[in-house]
Image (spheres, grey):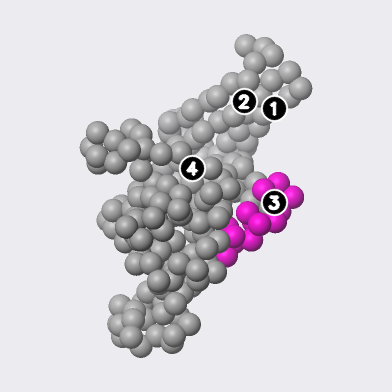
Protein backbone atom coordinates (compact mmCIF):
# COMPACT_ATOMS: atom_id res chain seq x y z
CA UNK A 1 0.00 0.00 0.00
CA UNK A 2 1.45 3.36 -0.99
CA UNK A 3 0.41 6.98 -0.49
CA UNK A 4 -2.11 5.99 2.19
CA UNK A 5 -2.67 6.79 5.86
CA UNK A 6 -2.89 3.46 7.68
CA UNK A 7 -4.34 2.65 11.11
CA UNK A 8 -2.66 -0.42 12.62
CA UNK A 9 -3.98 -2.36 15.62
CA UNK A 10 -1.70 -4.88 17.34
CA UNK A 11 -3.26 -7.23 19.89
CA UNK A 12 -1.09 -8.17 21.68
CA UNK A 13 2.47 -6.90 21.16
CA UNK A 14 3.62 -9.11 24.05
CA UNK A 15 3.00 -12.11 21.80
CA UNK A 16 5.72 -10.83 19.49
CA UNK A 17 8.21 -10.77 22.37
CA UNK A 18 7.04 -14.16 23.58
CA UNK A 19 7.37 -15.72 20.12
CA UNK A 20 10.88 -14.32 19.80
CA UNK A 21 11.77 -15.86 23.15
CA UNK A 22 10.51 -19.29 22.07
CA UNK A 23 12.39 -19.16 18.77
CA UNK A 24 15.53 -18.06 20.58
CA UNK A 25 15.24 -21.01 22.98
CA UNK A 26 14.82 -23.44 20.05
CA UNK A 27 17.98 -22.01 18.47
CA UNK A 28 19.87 -22.67 21.70
CA UNK A 29 20.68 -19.05 22.49
CA UNK A 30 21.52 -18.14 26.08
CA UNK A 31 18.58 -16.13 27.49
CA UNK A 32 19.03 -12.72 29.06
CA UNK A 33 17.04 -11.17 31.94
CA UNK A 34 13.85 -12.99 33.00
CA UNK A 35 14.38 -15.58 30.28
CA UNK A 36 13.87 -13.30 27.26
CA UNK A 37 15.94 -13.59 24.12
CA UNK A 38 19.20 -11.57 24.07
CA UNK A 39 17.99 -9.86 20.87
CA UNK A 40 14.71 -8.55 22.36
CA UNK A 41 15.63 -4.86 22.06
CA UNK A 42 16.84 -5.08 18.46
CA UNK A 43 13.84 -7.19 17.36
CA UNK A 44 11.36 -4.78 18.94
CA UNK A 45 13.17 -1.81 17.40
CA UNK A 46 13.10 -3.41 13.95
CA UNK A 47 9.32 -3.80 14.20
CA UNK A 48 8.47 -0.47 15.81
CA UNK A 49 10.68 1.65 13.56
CA UNK A 50 8.76 0.44 10.52
CA UNK A 51 5.67 2.14 11.99
CA UNK A 52 6.42 5.63 10.79
CA UNK A 53 5.20 8.61 8.78
CA UNK A 54 6.54 10.01 5.54
CA UNK A 55 5.49 12.73 3.11
CA UNK A 56 3.58 10.10 1.14
CA UNK A 57 1.68 8.46 3.98
CA UNK A 58 1.59 7.50 7.61
CA UNK A 59 1.04 4.55 9.95
CA UNK A 60 -0.68 5.19 13.27
CA UNK A 61 -0.51 2.23 15.62
CA UNK A 62 -2.57 1.23 18.66
CA UNK A 63 -0.93 -1.58 20.58
CA UNK A 64 -2.32 -3.63 23.46
CA UNK A 65 0.54 -4.37 25.86
CA UNK A 66 0.29 -7.23 28.37
CA UNK A 67 2.30 -6.45 31.50
CA UNK A 68 3.37 -9.71 33.23
CA UNK A 69 2.49 -9.66 36.95
CA UNK A 70 1.78 -5.91 36.60
CA UNK A 71 5.56 -5.35 36.53
CA UNK A 72 6.26 -2.32 34.34
CA UNK A 73 10.00 -3.01 34.62
CA UNK A 74 9.63 -6.40 32.90
CA UNK A 75 11.91 -6.31 29.81
CA UNK A 76 9.11 -7.06 27.30
CA UNK A 77 6.71 -4.18 28.14
CA UNK A 78 9.58 -1.85 29.11
CA UNK A 79 11.18 -2.33 25.69
CA UNK A 80 7.82 -1.70 24.01
CA UNK A 81 7.04 1.46 25.99
CA UNK A 82 10.31 3.07 24.95
CA UNK A 83 9.01 3.20 21.35
CA UNK A 84 5.51 4.56 22.06
CA UNK A 85 4.43 8.21 21.98
CA UNK A 86 1.62 7.65 24.50
CA UNK A 87 0.52 4.98 26.93
CA UNK A 88 -2.93 4.39 28.43
CA UNK A 89 -2.65 2.30 31.60
CA UNK A 90 -5.71 0.45 32.92
CA UNK A 91 -6.02 0.00 36.68
CA UNK A 92 -7.91 -2.81 38.46
CA UNK A 93 -8.48 -0.67 41.56
CA UNK A 94 -10.53 1.79 39.50
CA UNK A 95 -12.67 -1.06 38.14
CA UNK A 96 -13.31 -2.20 41.71
CA UNK A 97 -14.60 1.30 42.49
CA UNK A 98 -16.85 1.26 39.42
CA UNK A 99 -14.90 4.05 37.72
CA UNK A 100 -14.98 3.71 33.92
CA UNK A 101 -12.99 4.09 31.77
CA UNK A 102 -10.52 2.60 34.28
CA UNK A 103 -7.58 4.65 33.02
CA UNK A 104 -4.93 5.55 35.59
CA UNK A 105 -3.88 9.16 34.94
CA UNK A 106 -0.75 8.73 37.07
CA UNK A 107 0.79 5.82 35.15
CA UNK A 108 -0.55 6.87 31.74
CA UNK A 109 1.64 9.26 29.78
CA UNK A 110 1.95 11.18 26.53
CA UNK A 111 4.89 12.86 24.86
CA UNK A 112 2.35 15.25 23.35
CA UNK A 113 1.57 16.79 26.75
CA UNK A 114 3.70 19.86 26.23
CA UNK A 115 2.77 23.57 26.36
CA UNK A 116 4.06 23.93 22.79
CA UNK A 117 1.62 21.30 21.53
CA UNK A 118 -1.51 21.39 23.72
CA UNK A 119 -1.24 24.97 24.95
CA UNK A 120 -0.29 26.48 28.31
CA UNK A 121 -3.72 26.16 29.98
CA UNK A 122 -4.25 22.53 28.98
CA UNK A 123 -0.75 21.63 30.17
CA UNK A 124 -1.06 23.38 33.54
CA UNK A 125 -4.51 21.92 34.29
CA UNK A 126 -3.37 18.39 33.35
CA UNK A 127 -0.28 18.61 35.54
CA UNK A 128 -2.29 20.08 38.42
CA UNK A 129 -4.79 17.21 38.19
CA UNK A 130 -1.93 14.70 38.33
CA UNK A 131 -0.42 16.52 41.30
CA UNK A 132 -3.67 16.42 43.29
CA UNK A 133 -4.23 12.73 42.48
CA UNK A 134 -0.65 11.88 43.46
CA UNK A 135 -1.03 13.66 46.79
CA UNK A 136 -4.28 11.77 47.40
CA UNK A 137 -2.49 8.50 46.64
CA UNK A 138 0.27 9.41 49.10
CA UNK A 139 -2.32 10.07 51.81
CA UNK A 140 -4.29 6.85 51.37
CA UNK A 141 -2.19 4.83 53.83
CA UNK A 142 -2.63 7.51 56.49
CA UNK A 143 -6.39 7.61 55.83
CA UNK A 144 -6.61 3.80 56.07
CA UNK A 145 -4.78 3.71 59.43
CA UNK A 146 -5.80 6.90 61.22
CA UNK A 147 -8.88 8.05 59.30
CA UNK A 148 -9.51 11.17 57.28
CA UNK A 149 -10.28 13.24 60.40
CA UNK A 150 -6.59 13.15 61.34
CA UNK A 151 -5.55 15.01 58.20
CA UNK A 152 -4.85 18.73 58.07
CA UNK A 153 -7.51 21.01 56.61
CA UNK A 154 -5.41 21.44 53.47
CA UNK A 155 -5.06 17.68 52.99
CA UNK A 156 -8.79 17.18 53.61
CA UNK A 157 -9.49 19.68 50.85
CA UNK A 158 -7.01 17.90 48.55
CA UNK A 159 -8.70 14.54 49.21
CA UNK A 160 -12.17 15.98 48.52
CA UNK A 161 -11.06 17.52 45.23
CA UNK A 162 -9.15 14.39 44.20
CA UNK A 163 -12.27 12.28 44.69
CA UNK A 164 -14.29 14.70 42.59
CA UNK A 165 -11.60 14.55 39.90
CA UNK A 166 -11.75 10.74 39.92
CA UNK A 167 -15.52 10.83 39.51
CA UNK A 168 -15.35 13.50 36.79
CA UNK A 169 -12.83 11.38 34.86
CA UNK A 170 -15.59 8.81 34.29
CA UNK A 171 -17.53 9.02 31.05
CA UNK A 172 -20.62 7.19 29.77
CA UNK A 173 -19.81 4.93 26.80
CA UNK A 174 -21.93 4.62 23.68
CA UNK A 175 -21.01 0.90 23.52
CA UNK A 176 -22.22 0.34 27.09
CA UNK A 177 -25.47 2.27 26.71
CA UNK A 178 -27.69 -0.83 26.58
CA UNK A 179 -26.12 -2.21 29.76
CA UNK A 180 -25.95 0.95 31.88
CA UNK A 181 -28.99 2.83 30.66
CA UNK A 182 -26.81 5.94 30.35
CA UNK A 183 -26.56 7.68 26.99
CA UNK A 184 -23.03 7.86 25.59
CA UNK A 185 -21.50 11.28 25.18
CA UNK A 186 -18.61 13.02 23.47
CA UNK A 187 -17.03 15.95 25.30
CA UNK A 188 -14.92 18.70 23.76
CA UNK A 189 -11.38 19.15 25.07
CA UNK A 190 -12.16 22.77 25.96
CA UNK A 191 -15.10 21.72 28.12
CA UNK A 192 -13.00 19.08 29.87
CA UNK A 193 -10.26 21.60 30.69
CA UNK A 194 -12.88 24.05 31.96
CA UNK A 195 -14.37 21.41 34.26
CA UNK A 196 -11.12 20.34 35.87
CA UNK A 197 -10.00 23.94 36.20
CA UNK A 198 -13.12 24.75 38.22
CA UNK A 199 -12.63 21.71 40.47
CA UNK A 200 -9.00 22.65 41.12
CA UNK A 201 -9.83 26.28 41.86
CA UNK A 202 -12.35 25.31 44.55
CA UNK A 203 -15.35 26.80 42.77
CA UNK A 204 -17.20 23.49 43.12
CA UNK A 205 -16.18 22.54 46.67
CA UNK A 206 -19.82 22.82 47.77
CA UNK A 207 -20.99 20.11 45.31
CA UNK A 208 -20.86 16.49 46.61
CA UNK A 209 -18.47 14.13 44.78
CA UNK A 210 -21.22 11.77 43.60
CA UNK A 211 -22.65 14.54 41.42
CA UNK A 212 -19.51 14.32 39.24
CA UNK A 213 -19.96 10.63 38.41
CA UNK A 214 -20.61 9.72 34.75
CA UNK A 215 -21.15 13.29 33.60
CA UNK A 216 -20.11 14.86 30.33
CA UNK A 217 -19.50 18.55 30.96
CA UNK A 218 -19.16 20.43 34.23
CA UNK A 219 -22.35 22.31 33.37
CA UNK A 220 -24.25 19.03 33.74
CA UNK A 221 -22.77 18.59 37.21
CA UNK A 222 -23.84 22.09 38.26
CA UNK A 223 -27.29 21.66 36.74
CA UNK A 224 -27.90 18.37 38.58
CA UNK A 225 -26.76 19.87 41.86
CA UNK A 226 -29.11 22.82 41.52
CA UNK A 227 -31.71 20.25 40.44
- For the N terminus, which image quadrant? top right
Membership of 121 in magenta stretch:
yes
Question: Which percent across, then down, holds residue 213?
Answer: 34, 55
Q: At 39% from the left edge and 55% from the top edge, which residue is drawn? A: 223
Mark 2 or 3, closer to the camera: 3
Q: Which residues are magenta?
A: 115-131
Horizontal side of 161 relative to 144 (left or right) equals: right
- For the C terminus, which image quadrant? bottom left
Does 220 appear above or below 10?
below
For disc 2, the marked residue is 59
Mark 2 or 4, closer to the camera: 4
Q: At 29% from the left edge and 41% from the top edge, which residue is drawn? A: 182
Query: Upstream in the sequence, badge 2 or badge 3?
Result: 2
Q: Which mark is residue 119?
A: 3
Location of residue 64 by image quarter: top left
Foreground residue, 141 or 159?
159
Foreground residue, 103 or 214?
214
Q: Residues within 10 Å of mark 3 (few under 14, many from 20)?
A: few
Query: Upstream in the sequence, badge 2 or badge 4?
Result: 2
For disc 1, the marked residue is 53
For disc 4, the marked residue is 187
Query: Exactly how many numbered labels are in the figure?
Result: 4
Q: Are marks 1 and 2 in contact (CB under 8 Å)?
A: yes
Please say whether residue 198 is visible from this viewpoint: yes
Foreground residue, 136 or 45?
136
Which secondary structure lies at badge 1? strand
Secondary structure, magenta segment, majority class: helix
Amino acid sequence: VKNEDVLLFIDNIFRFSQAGSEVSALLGRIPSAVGYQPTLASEMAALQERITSTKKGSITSFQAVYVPADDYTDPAPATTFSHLDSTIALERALVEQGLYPAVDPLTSSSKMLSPDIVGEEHYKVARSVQSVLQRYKDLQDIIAILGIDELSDEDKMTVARARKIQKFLTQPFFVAEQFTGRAGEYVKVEDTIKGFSQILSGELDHIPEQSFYMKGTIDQVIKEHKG
